[in-house]
Image: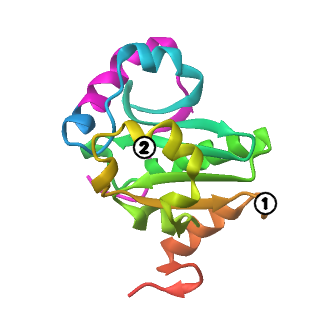
């Protein structure tokens, strides 16, 4: 079943979710879609995570890492393959963006191999060089640092509260950044 109707509940992660989160994270790390996350890392950062639960199991997750007073990263956004295309990723991003707004952050970013997904949610392309705190904290330690295949996207949070929801609604109508998609 591949429908746009969300079929999962997105909520803050709990410690008891970690054993169910790890297999999905491990699978995406094996595919080199995300950086590996150890159990210790997930437990230590549990407050950063949101999960999507469907049919009594964890089917998707993502985290919000605050890098500084003006910037946070949405990272490790993964959805079990059988639950992709149902709007769950959008729900997770919306919740993480709402948390960033509550913290008073002026912008969030993500590094991704699927920039189209984020562009539909109102993010804009940027250069990794424009995110020096990310480069200093993580990128310099990444084995792909000199041959990075990820695209940087950023979302300013200084606009109306509904920015992401409006962008998602526009993309549902085939529009990205006010233009009709080809």
- Secondary structure state at the residue bearing disc 1: loop
Identify residue for label 1.
158
Quarter where residue 115 is shown: bottom left
Q: Position of residue 128 (x, y in %)?
A: 49, 58
Residue 12, magenta (yes or no) = yes
Residue at the image position 60 percent from the left and 42 percent from the top? 96
Q: Residues within 10 Å of mark 1 (few under 14, many from 20)?
A: few
Can the viewer see residue 14 in this picture?
no
- Mark carried by residue 139: 2
Q: Residues within 10 Å of mark 2 (few under 14, many from 20)?
A: some
- Mark carried by residue 6: none
Q: Could you tell me how many numbered marks the image carries? A: 2
Residue at the image position 38 percent from the left and 88 percent from the top? 182
Horizontally, residue 152 falls left or right of residue 47, namely left
Residue at the image position 57 percent from the left and 74 percent from the top? 170
- Secondary structure state at the residue bearing disc 2: helix
Q: Which callout, 2 or 1, points to the residue nearer the camera? A: 2
Can the viewer see residue 43 in this picture?
yes
**Height in image: 29 above or below 56?**
below
Q: Position of residue 82 (x, y in %)?
A: 25, 44
Horizontally, residue 83 falls left or right of residue 169, namely left
Instruction: Give me the C-alpha separation between circle 2 and circle 1.
Output: 27 Å
**Height in image: 40 above or below 159?**
above
The magenta segment is 1-26
Depth check: 120 or 87 in front?
120
């Amino acid at each position: 079943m591949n429908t746009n109707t969300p079929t999962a509940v997105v909520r803050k992660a709990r410690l008891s979710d970690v054993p169910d989160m790890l297999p999905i994270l491990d699978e995406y790390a094996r595919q080199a879609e995300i950086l590996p996350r150890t159990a210790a890392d997930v437990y230590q950062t549990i407050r950063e995570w949101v999960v999507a639960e469907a049919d009594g199991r964890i089917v998707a997750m993502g985290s919000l890492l605050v890098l500084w007073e003006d910037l946070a990263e949405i990272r490790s956004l993964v959805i079990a393959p059988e639950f992709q295309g149902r709007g769950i990723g959008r729900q997770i991003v919306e919740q993480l963006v709402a948390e960033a707004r509550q913290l008073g952050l002026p912008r969030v970013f993500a590094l991704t191999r699927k920039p189209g997904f984020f562009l539909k949610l109102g993010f804009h392309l940027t250069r990794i060089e424009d995110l020096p705190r990310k480069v200093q904290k993580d990128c310099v330690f990444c084995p792909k640092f000199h041959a990075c295949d990820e695209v940087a996207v950023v979302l300013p949070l200084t606009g109306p509260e509904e920015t992401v929801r409006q962008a998602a609604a526009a993309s549902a109508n085939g529009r990205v950044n006010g233009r009709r998609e080809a």
